[in-house]
Amino acid sequence: MSIAIYPGSFDPVTLGHLNIIRRAASCFDQLIVCVMVNSAKQGMFTPEERADLLRRVTGNLPNVEVDRSNELLASYARRRGATVVVKGLRAVSDYEQEVQMAVINRKLNPQLETMFLASSDRYTYLSSTIVKEMARYGANLAGFVPPEIEEDVARRMRIIQGKEG
Ligand code: ADP
C-alpha cells in the first residue's frame, strides 16, 4: 500500500492546500495530511483546531486522514509507514528551501522520497499568510479558503482583534 504524507502548518487550510490534497489523494492509496507543530510559532489557530478545519474540508475524500505531530518529519513518516512526502510548489521562491528539506529528509530516512506538485495557476499567489492578512482587514475570503471554514477564519480574526468575545 502506498502511503504519502502532506505536511504543513495549515494555519488555516487554503484552497491552494486543498487543491494539492485532492490531486495527491488520487496518486496514492492513502494520504496523511499532517499539521506539523512548530512550538516557536504562535498561530491563528491551535494545531488541534487546524486539524479540525482540515477534517471538515476533506471529509468527502475517503483515503485522506488528518493528523498532527511534533515529531521530526522523517521519524513521523517511518512510524506511519509512509514512503513519500508531498509538497506543493508555488513559485521559484519555494524551491530552494523545499529541495534543501527534501535532501535532509532523505538523509535522515533513506526510504523517504519527496514529490513536488506544481501549484494550480489559480492558487500560485495564495498562502495562509495572505489569508490572515486579508482577514485582518475584513476582506471577503471567498475563493481563498474552502467555503465551510470562511466564517471560522473571519470570526477568529475578529476575536483576536478584540471585536468579538
Ligand atoms: P503556507 O505557506 O500557506 O503557510 P504551509 O506551511 O501550510 O503553507 O504549506 C504546506 C505545503 O503546502 C507546502 O508544501 C507549501 O508549498 C504548500 N502550499 C501552500 N500553499 C500552496 C498553494 N497555494 N498552492 C500549492 N501549494 C501550496
Image (cartoon, helix red, strand yellow):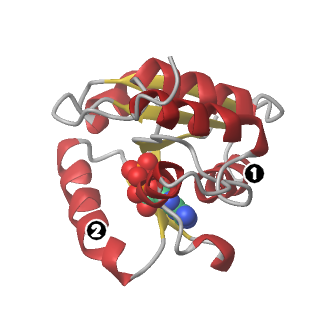
Quick one: quadrant of the N terminus? top right
Kindly indicate the quadrant of the structure image that contains residue 161: top left
Tell me, yes or no, whether the two marked residues, 1 and 2, touch with CB atoms within 8 Å: no
Visible in this render: residue 38? yes
- Identify the residue at image location x=25%, y=42%: 109
**Disc 1 packing (10 Å; few <14; some 14–19; many ≥20):** few
Kindly indicate the quadrant of the structure image that contains residue 33: top right
Q: Kindly state the secondary structure of the residue where label 2 is placed.
A: helix
Q: Kindly state the secondary structure of the residue where label 1 is placed.
A: loop
**Disc 2 packing (10 Å; few <14; some 14–19; many ≥20):** few
Q: Earlier in the sequence, mark 1 or mark 2?
A: 1
- Identify the residue at image location x=76%, y=36%: 148
Type of the residue with mark 1? Ser
Type of the residue with mark 2? Val
State left or right for residue 164 relative to residue 40: right
x and y, in percent, of residue 9 in the image: 40, 41
In the picture as drawn, the residue positioned furthest to the front comes out as 163
Question: Mark 2 near ligand 1 (CB under 8 Å)?
Answer: no
Q: Which mark is residue 26?
A: 1
Q: Nearer the viewer, residue 60 or 158?
A: 158
Q: Nearer the viewer, residue 14 or 34?
A: 14
State left or right for residue 53 relative to residue 93: right
Question: Mark 1 near ligand 1 (CB under 8 Å)?
Answer: no
Q: Which mark is residue 88?
A: none
- Identify the residue at image location x=83%, y=33%: 60
Q: Which mark is residue 99?
A: 2
Visible in this render: residue 86? no
Position of 45 relative to 27 (above/below): above
Tell me how far mark 1 sits from mark 2, CA to CA.
23 Å
x and y, in percent, of residue 65 in the image: 63, 27
